[in-house]
Amino acid sequence: MLRLLTLILLSLSNLLASPVALINDRVVSREEFNLVFDLYWKEILHLSPKKPTIRDKELFLLEYIKGEILEDVAKEMGIVVTDEEIDERLRLWGRNPSANPLIRDFVRRELLAQRVSEVVAGSIYISEGEIKAYYILNRREFFYPKQVKLLRVVVDEKRRAKKVREMLKKGIIPSGKGIIIGKERWYSVQSLPRKVRSRLYPYKKGRVTLPIKYDGKYIILKVVDTRKSGILPLEMVRDQVRLKLLKRKREEVFRQWFQEVLQSYRLELYPENL
């Protein structure tokens, strides 16, 4: 029993010997921090080829502490995140829901922070004047390059692809076996592959490309519409601007609120132990 107690005390001594932070009575050890940080760096940011700097670790430590405190606050506010919500967010990230428990914990904390922020910020009103002012002062943000609206048709064999091309040139939308009609979409001309750009040039409405062989099938593109480069009108970006301003205001309200929350915590940082 004495030996067991000695081992426990030694373990506690080693743990306290290398803390990176102290949140009230909660010790964040270097071992715990490195375990979480390594996972974050490799699995969340996908920056494994790059070596993290001390500054990277310091910034993450602040976020980690913020997450610890928000967990306490969310519990007091009665805010919870379900496993189903975590699964849904992981799917949006393109990850398997049965991911590493630490990754699930990252997701849970992100969702908690989002919920707390929404509750703290409450209903924020964005006026039409604010929207117009932002648009006028940041017009270059809404610049768009020359674009083409393309109809994409995929055909399973070359002979059928030639017939489909002739139909498209006549304004007929083909259908039938071995033909897949895609949705019409706008594309920046410069973002298109060089081979596609050369086939579409001079980008006139109604132009139809020759069949392009790709992955054992044939793709035919038709220019449905064109749009010169310019600034998107306010009518098209009003909702986008409103959401941006709303996010900015919420972040400011949340930041001020969190500064007040921190006053009730005893917080000590030991960056030299990172």
Image (tube, rainbow, N blue to C red):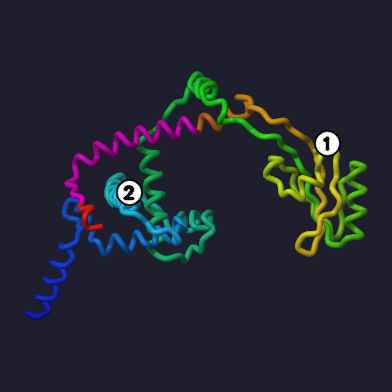
Please identify the quadrant where the C terminus is shown: bottom left
Q: Which residue extends farthest left? A: 2
Relative to 125, 179 lies left or right: right
Q: Residue at x 40, y 44 (%)?
A: 114
Please identify the quadrant where the N terminus is shown: bottom left
Could you say which quadrant of the image residue 249 lies in? top left
- In this view, the residue in front, 86 or 148, is 148
Residue 206: x %, y % from top left:
85, 39
Residue 4: x %, y % from top left:
12, 78
Q: Residue at x 37, y 56 (%)?
A: 52
What's the CA distance linking mark 2 and mark 1? 51 Å
Dot 2 falls on a residue whose secondary structure is helix
The stretch of residues the image draws in magenta is 244-269
Q: Dominant secondary structure of the magenta stretch?
A: helix
Residue at the disc numbered 2: 59
Q: Is residue 75 above or below residue 232?
A: below
Q: Which mark is residue 205?
A: 1
